[in-house]
Amino acid sequence: MKYLVVVERGRDAWGAHVPDLPGCSAAGETREEVLRLIREAIAFDIEGRHEAGEMIPSPASESEVVDVDAA
């Protein structure tokens, strides 16, 4: 499965979260680190839901980059 991951650069760190898996997030010092950690977090989230007998949400989120005129 492929889930949309939102990656955000902060002042001192990077963060990532998965809109289709509420609560699934990660933080790291670099973009590469946060991507590695969010992959691990997704696997952990799905494994936990599976073991608990919960439904695993299907990927449904989409993204789009839009151009806007800056004021």
Image (cartoon, grey):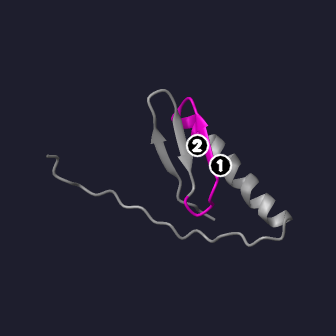
Q: Residues within 10 Å of mark 2 (few under 14, many from 20)?
A: many
Q: Secondary structure at mark 2?
A: helix
Q: Residue 62 placed where, x, y %?
A: 45, 66
Q: Give the amino acid at mark 1.
A: Arg
The one nearer the camera, 62 or 32, is 62
The answer to if 25 sits in the magenta stretch is yes
Q: Is residue 53 left or right of residue 13?
A: right
The residue carrying mark 2 is 35
Q: Secondary structure at mark 1?
A: helix
What residue is shown at x 58% (from left), y 64% (from top)? 20
Q: Residue 15 placed where, x, y %?
A: 53, 40
The answer to if 71 sits in the magenta stretch is no
Magenta stretch: give its range.
Answer: 19-34
Q: Is residue 49 left or right of residue 5?
A: right
What residue is shown at x 85% (from left), y 64% (from top)? 51
Q: Residue 50 placed where, x, y %?
A: 81, 66
Q: Give the number of the disc on residue 39.
A: 1
What residue is shown at x 57% (from left), y 61% (from top)? 3
CB within 8 Å, label 1 to label 2: yes
Q: Quadrant of residue 32?
A: top right
